[in-house]
Amino acid sequence: METLMIEDLKGLLKKVQGFIQNELLPYEQEHQLNAEEDIPMETIQWVRKRSRELGFYGINLPKEYGGQDLSLKGLCLLKEEIARSGAVLWGQVIGEIGGPLRIGQMLESFTEEQKQKYVLPIVTGEASCCFALTEPNAGSDAFSIETTAVRDGNDYILNGKKHFISAAPYADFAIVIAKEIVEGGKGRITAFIVDKQTQGKSGFELGKIQVPMSGERIHAELLFNQCRVPASNIIGAPGKGLLLGLKRINTNRASHAAGFVGMAQHLLDLSIQQAKTRVQFGRPISDFQAIQHMLAEMATEIYAARSMVYDVVEKIDRGEEDRAGASMAKLFASEVTNRVADKAVQIFGSQGLVKGHPVEKMYRSSRMYRILTGTSEIQKNTIAKELLKA
Ligand SMILES: Cc1cc2nc3c(=O)[nH]c(=O)nc-3n(C[C@H](O)[C@H](O)[C@H](O)COP(=O)(O)OP(=O)(O)OC[C@H]3O[C@@H](n4cnc5c(N)ncnc54)[C@H](O)[C@@H]3O)c2cc1C
């Protein structure tokens, strides 16, 4: 059974490699796609449709949702391979950005009606969603959110602002975490589905596009000004909003880490190629021990990060709760990728500094990994808390 599973995974990886090399990368080249420019929605739809036909899109979901109930390990292997390709649209292949990966672990919290109306279009790739927790005054300290929800008959009225929300510019609905004001109480954290259909009509607006140093134009503010949302759009139950986030926190951190390892490996692949072909002082720079040592250090750190990621992922797949392990994997993989990117720039010399060069772009992206999905300091806090538990 185990052998069969490994064979299945190998087949899946081969299939995804075939798709990337024979379809996705040639498509990106033909259409001269650039990650730092607006990507047309038709392009995103094309990747999703093709990826769904091949069985990758939403592969983590249960079979009744068209997925394959893929283990977290399988998902991470797939994600690492896709990230390693350096494809501009890598995040769309398994639905990382605005797709099924956003809702995977929350699936059972949606009502049947919400599943039909909101979840199924995500699964088929026709619609996109975003997860909106962070606010200008509530980053690492998620409990301090200031977006409020007040009951008004069968509706809730939302007021507040979210920022740095991935996929917000093209999301058809947002999962918005708000503080529900309860009479006499301190307020409870509740999750709401806010439909784009109501944008501009009911006090819901897309705010500024926020372009981080990676240059991508896929993060934005969401503004709520007396925004009316039906009570039937609550996910789970009132007061269970943060639980929704916590449910996905370990898998989310581990799966992000797998993507970081994929990028680090891509940087190493490019660096080896460069070292073998760039000639200085009459010989390839790979002849110099200084370059060899950098490559060796990169490979060693990637190996350690990868081993850590799959160790924790296997534990999560076995049903073990390993909060410290998931945080260690996110912390270590993000810091390793950043160090690997730094060495790759060094090996590429001035070429690696040119704006738009793949190594230069990854250097900027990898710096962000130490902040998103919980900063390195927050991961250390989690690890220490587990260590010091009574
Ligand atoms: C590219 C990108 C995409 C994102 N996508 C989303 C998204 O889709 N949805 C969403 O809701 N959010 C998203 N975020 C927001 C992200 O989750 C936050 O940026 C992150 O949680 C950190 O919050 P902050 O940026 O406000 O930093 P702050 O919390 O202000 O932290 C500033 C500094 O203080 C440190 N610090 C804070 N508290 C402590 C502490 N207790 N102990 C030690 N050090 C501390 C931090 O580590 C950091 O160094 C995204 C961010 C980025 C960059």
Image (cartoon, grey):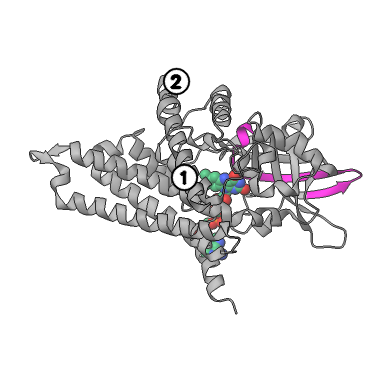
In the picture of the structure, the residue carrying the numbered disc 2 is 31
Left/right of residue 233 with respect to residue 309 in the rendered view: right
Give how far apart the Cα atoms at labels 2 and 1 are: 35 Å
Which of disc 1 and disc 2 is earlier in sequence? 1
Residue at x-position 38% and y-position 54%: 336
Left/right of residue 58 with respect to residue 376 in the rendered view: right
Task: Name the element at disc 2.
Answer: loop
In the picture of the structure, the residue carrying the numbered disc 1 is 7
Q: From the image, give the main secondary structure of the stretch colored magenta.
A: strand
Asked if the residue under mark 1 is in contact with the one under mark 2, i.e. CB atoms within 8 Å, the reply is: no
Q: Residue furthest top?
A: 30
Q: Where are the magenta residues, as a range? A: 149-171
Q: Where is 232 relative to 172, above or below?
A: below
Q: Label 2 is placed on what type of residue?
A: His
Q: Where is 374 relative to 366, above or below?
A: below
Q: Quadrant of residue 201?
A: top right
Residue at x-position 48% and y-position 39%: 12
- In which quadrant of the rendered image does the C terminus lie? bottom right
Mark 2 is surrounded, within 10 Å at the Cα level, by few (under 14), some (14 to 19) or many (20 or more) other residues, namely few
* Mark closer to the observer (2, 1): 1
Q: Quadrant of residue 122?
A: top right
Q: Label 1 is placed on what type of residue?
A: Glu
Mark 1 within 8 Å of ligand 1, using the beta carbon: no
